[in-house]
Image: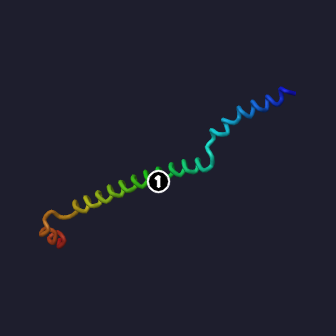
Amino acid sequence: MRVCPAFAVLAALALLPACQSEPGFDEKFEQQSRELSARAQKIETETRAQLDAAREAEQAAAEFRRPSHPEAAPQAAER
């Protein structure tokens, strides 16, 4: 009978560290919240960079289409 209580105590001591190593709900929630915030920030940064590049490309295209000699533009329109 002495073996059974000793075994129970040893089993409890062996399982105790395993229970403490698993993060709790709050810790998991905070970690996932931080990860999602970091992803969102990265997406916002990439989106902002793409939008800026698109605006620059549109501005460059508008400047390219603009006639270099404004007085020549009406003659081209009359033809």
Residue name at image x 75 percent, y 32 percent = 11
| Furthest residue toward right | 1
The amino acid type of the residue labelled 1 equals Ala
Foreground: 78 or 62?
62
- Apparent side of residue 54 relative to residue 35 in the rendered image (left or right): left
* Position of residue 65 measured from the top left corner of the image (x, y, whole percent): 23, 62
Residue name at image x 25 percent, y 58 percent = 60
Above or below, 55 relative to 71? above
- Apparent side of residue 6 relative to residue 62 in the rendered image (left or right): right
Give the quarter of the image for residue 21.
top right
- Apparent side of residue 68 relative to residue 54 in the rendered image (left or right): left
* Position of residue 14 measured from the top left corner of the image (x, y, whole percent): 71, 32
Quarter of the image with the N terminus is top right
* Position of residue 38 measured from the top left corner of the image (x, y, whole percent): 46, 50
Q: Is disc 1 placed on a helix, strand or loop?
A: helix
Residue name at image x 33 percent, y 57 percent = 52
Foreground: 7 or 51?
7
- Apparent side of residue 56 relative to residue 74 in the rendered image (left or right): right
* Position of residue 77 measured from the top left corner of the image (x, y, whole percent): 19, 71
Foreground: 71 or 51?
51
Quarter of the image with the C terminus is bottom left
The colour scheme applied to this rendered structure is: rainbow
The count of marks equals 1
Above or below, 2 relative to 19? above
Circle 1: is it few (<14), some (14-19), or many (20+) Cα within 10 Å? few
Residue pointed to by mark 1:
40
Above or below, 56 relative to 20? below
Foreground: 18 or 70?
18
